[in-house]
Amino acid sequence: MKQYLPIILLMFLFSFSSCDDALDCIINVRPELRTKTLALGFVDEYYSEMITAEIKNEVNDNDYNYYFDVVGRLPEGLEVFYNRRREVVFKGISKEAGRFRLEVYLEVTPHYDEYGRINGPLCSDNTSESYVLVIR
């Protein structure tokens, strides 16, 4: 009986939700921001760094719309640019030194194709990640 327990549990799970939704959550299809240490920057020198996003366990990452928001203070002289193609870019010439804590938020929505079909569904449609920008 113990060998059949996982199969019974899966059947029970699928009976209360659509198979696609449950399968996507088992596979863990969700947005993800790359965890990384931001490059060290220096006052009065050009700085450029990028954070990329993806849909975990999804080969068609570009078939989603990506919406970013960065919360936190950037050093004077640096700006943030949002690229709908999965990137947040920090660039400019910093005029001040310090440690700057930034929270990057990401929300994704499926893209409809020319026939009105939708990608997805996703297990979750948003995520966030904390980063520290150091300027010396």
Image (cartoon, rainbow, N blue to C red):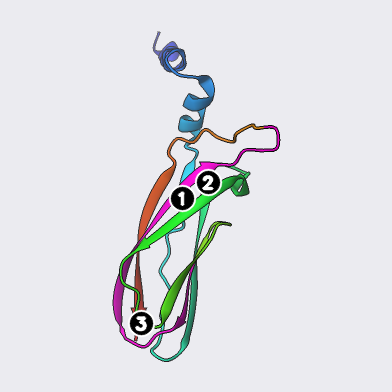
Amino acid type of the residue tagged 1 in the rendering = Glu
Magenta region's main secondary structure?
A: strand
Q: Which residue is mark 2?
A: 55
Mark 1, residues whose alpha carbon is within 10 Å: few (<14), some, or many (≥20)? many
In the shown orientation, is residue 81 left or right of residue 95? right
* Residue at figure coordinates x 40%, y 87% from the top left: 42
Residue 65 appears at what percent x and percent y? Answer: 55, 48
Q: Which residue is mark 3?
A: 76
Q: Is residue 61 above or below residue 41?
A: above
Discs 3, 2 touching: Cβ within 8 Å: no
Mark 3, residues whose alpha carbon is within 10 Å: few (<14), some, or many (≥20)? few
Quick one: SS at disc 3? loop
42, 93: nearer the viewer: 93
* Residue at figure coordinates x 45%, y 18% from the top left: 17
In the shown orientation, is residue 93 left or right of residue 112? left
Give whichever of discs 3 and 2 has the lower sequence position. Answer: 2
Residue 93 is covered by the magenta coloring: yes
